[in-house]
């Protein structure tokens, strides 16, 4: 069981408001999942380099030139997904409260 | 609905037949100048393509037949979240093009369904979530652009577990999809809608996404072919991200060749996906020689938890393959049992980062205006996300938080390296690894929803492939009987080395040929 306080702290970090029921349920379920993944500690990884993505390639370079322009002119469409926009900007509530 | 006697639907038992085969239905009907619609939905993509290009059928009839099946059956099955009726108008345009000039694209005029986490410009894309219920995509995913360029017709968007998180489609905010083989059972997931759409003929092919088995597992449950490409083979641009280091888009189809046709069309590097690889794909030979093919059978995949009927059918097939000159040998993938635990750290961690964008500002329906920013975020997300999505975000946030990062995330990424190394060693001795796709056939609704870990076990044989970034395919190889005379299909998984889809498709076609001559 993961404590209610820990679940509350994590839910704040994740920006998800949880009900009391959810806090209790997630506390229990997370404990079960963490117990399940505990098995990872059986593997000796003292000399293993962690993977850092889905591919084994690194440092992919590309030429510094103009792209194909397939997404040219789509900015309006993208802004339309937002709740509110002004001119060419997405509108956001005040970040700092007065 | 009209069912003209002119056309005999394909025998589903023989759907694996070769294109050059005498069984091709439209060839039998060749004396008739044009086949009218009725039930063209039994066609494979390959057959339909030949029939369209030879003028034996037209695109409108083909699309109209798929729409008819959707209208007839989808009230019960619920494979689709959106059906594009304007596909008919598009079909007429395609017919006009076909009348004017010969078309060579194998996908020209073929109705294809898309999992609803893949963007089509001007169409809704919900990812199965309430938070995107009213989101309209502003651009085409690269795979969609490629399908459109190949002349395919997008017929609609299919149901999925919310943000592709799940193994049954029970996590869709819009209600589950039912398994067409037995409606009391799940179709698998997360791409359950795409699998059900292909199994019923609502579309001739479909795209899904596979992060831990989300194409191969529902393909197994619904009795169709499902393929997950090598990580980087297919652009993820325009796929709503779940776990970016694992996600790949891939095809569902009735046959291996159809899956290869779709894969060929969508594969390739893309300026909008830095992890995509500019390797060209050269198609497998039509008559791939099984003789001499070295198959590895991991002993870890045949232990407790596997349905004995699945184990014995795969054993039987291996014997048949050996008669064809295949060299099968037992291999070991020693870290197999750690794949699921590693997966359930890596995935939630990436999920918690990827889903931060659904905040009520850029995407999602915001809560009341008067609240402060923090409350707007946390209330929008609380209302917009379902339980499994919340569970994974919370778990991922925990695993990445101060003090736990090394213990969970880094440890899981190290074990992931060991899992990839297991495969690397195995592929020094064998060309293909074969095993079950799923431990059981389709399970019942509600059977696993109360226990997240038991749901995760449905992906026990598929997640390692994603962690290692390998390509894999699930081939329907048999059925087990269920109540009421129903038959539940199951699949066999084949895995090839990185970027060797050519051998994967070739060997799968060879095995499909043997299956056609040896029904279970």
Image (cartoon, rainbow, N blue to C red):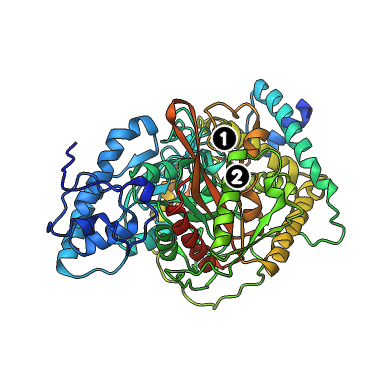
Mark closest to the chain's N terminus, 2 or 1: 2
Q: Give the x, y percent position of residue B217.
A: 54, 45
Q: Is residue A26 left or right of residue B94?
A: right
- Between B422 and B31, the one nearer to me in the picture: B31
Residue B170 to residue B195: above or below: above
- Between B20 and B455, the one nearer to me in the picture: B20
Q: Give the x, y percent position of residue B399.
A: 74, 43
Q: Is residue B21 left or right of residue B95?
A: right
Q: Give the x, y percent position of residue B174.
A: 44, 32
Residue tagged by mark 1?
B381
Q: Work out whether residue B73 can be spotted.
A: yes
**Which SS class for mark 2?**
helix
- Between A93 and B320, the one nearer to me in the picture: B320
Residue tagged by mark 2?
B312
Residue B164 to residue B269: above or below: above
Residue B182 to residue B405: above or below: above
What subunit carries mark 2? B
List the single residue furthest toward the top.
Answer: A21
**Residue A11: quadrant of the picture:** top right
Question: Rounded to the nearest whole Å, what is the CA distance between mark 2 and mark 1?
Answer: 47 Å
- Between B89 and B415, the one nearer to me in the picture: B415
Using a 10 Å C-alpha cutoff, classify the residue at mark 1 as few (fewer than 14 neighbours), some (14 to 19) or many (20 or more): many
Q: Give the x, y percent position of residue B2.
A: 17, 39
Q: Are marks 2 and 1 in contact (CB under 8 Å)?
A: no
């Amino acid at each position: 069981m993961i404590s209610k306080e820990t679940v509350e702290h994590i839910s704040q970090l994740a920006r998800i408001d949880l009900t009391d029921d959810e806090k209790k349920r997630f506390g229990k379920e997370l404990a079960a999942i963490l117990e399940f993944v505990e098995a990872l500690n059986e593997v000796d990884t003292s000399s293993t380099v962690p993977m850092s993505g889905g591919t084994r390639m690194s440092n992919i370079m590309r030429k510094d030139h103009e792209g194909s322009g397939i997404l040219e002119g789509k900015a309006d469409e993208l802004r339309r997904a937002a709740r509110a926009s002004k001119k060419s900007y997405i509108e956001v509530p005040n970040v700092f409260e007065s | 609905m009209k069912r003209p006697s002119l056309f005999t639907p394909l025998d589903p038992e023989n759907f694996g037949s070769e294109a050059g085969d005498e069984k091709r239905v439209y060839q039998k009907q060749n004396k008739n100048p044009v086949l009218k619609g009725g039930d063209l939905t039994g066609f494979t993509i390959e057959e339909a393509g030949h029939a369209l290009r030879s003028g034996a059928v037209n695109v409108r009839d083909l699309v109209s037949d798929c729409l008819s099946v959707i209208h007839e059956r989808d009230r019960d099955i619920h494979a689709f979240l959106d059906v594009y009726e304007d596909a008919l108008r598009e079909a007429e345009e395609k017919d006009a093009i076909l009348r004017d000039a010969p078309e060579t694209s194998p996908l020209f005029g073929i109705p294809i369904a898309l999992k609803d986490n893949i963007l089509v410009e001007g169409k809704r894309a919900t990812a199965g979530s309430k938070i995107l219920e009213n989101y309209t995509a502003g651009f085409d995913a690269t795979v969609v652009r490629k399908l459109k360029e190949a002349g395919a017709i997008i017929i609609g968007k299919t149901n999925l577990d919310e943000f592709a998180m799940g193994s049954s489609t029970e996590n869709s905010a819009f209600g589950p999809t039912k398994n067409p083989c037995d409606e009391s059972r799940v179709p698998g997931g997360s791409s359950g809608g795409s699998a059900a759409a292909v199994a019923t003929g609502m579309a001739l092919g479909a795209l899904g996404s596979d992060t831990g088995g989300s194409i191969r597992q529902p393909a197994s449950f619904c009795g169709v072919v499902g393929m997950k490409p090598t990580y980087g083979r297919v652009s993820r641009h325009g796929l709503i991200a779940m776990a970016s280091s694992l996600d790949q888009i891939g095809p569902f189809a009735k046959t291996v060749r159809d899956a290869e046709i779709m894969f060929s069309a969508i594969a390739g590097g893309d300026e909008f996906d830095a992890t995509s690889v500019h390797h060209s794909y050269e198609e497998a030979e039509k008559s791939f020689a099984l003789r001499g093919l070295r198959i590895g059978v991991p002993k870890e995949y045949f232990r407790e938890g596997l349905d004995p009927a699945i184990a014995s059918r795969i054993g039987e097939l291996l014997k048949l393959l050996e008669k064809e000159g295949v060299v099968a040998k037992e291999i070991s993938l020693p870290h197999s049992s750690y794949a699921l635990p590693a997966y359930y750290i890596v995935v939630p961690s990436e999920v918690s980062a990827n889903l931060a964008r659904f905040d009520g500002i850029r995407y999602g329906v915001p809560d009341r205006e008067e609240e402060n920013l923090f409350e707007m975020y946390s209330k929008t997300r609380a209302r917009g996300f379902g339980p499994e999505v919340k569970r994974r975000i919370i778990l991922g946030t925990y695993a990445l938080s101060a003090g736990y990062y090394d213990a969970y995330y880094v440890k899981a990424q190290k074990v992931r390296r060991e899992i990839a190394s297991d495969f690397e060693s195995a592929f020094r001795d064998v060309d293909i690894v074969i095993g079950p796709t799923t431990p059981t056939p389709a399970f019942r609704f509600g059977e696993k929803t109360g226990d997240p870990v038991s749901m995760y076990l449905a992906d026990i044989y598929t997640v390692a492939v994603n962690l290692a970034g390998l390509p894999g395919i699930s081939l329907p190889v048999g059925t087990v009987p269920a109540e009421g005379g129903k038959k539940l299909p199951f699949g066999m998984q084949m895995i090839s080395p990185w970027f060797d889809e050519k051998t994967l498709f070739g060997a799968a076609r060879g095995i499909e040929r043997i299956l056609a001559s040896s029904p279970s």
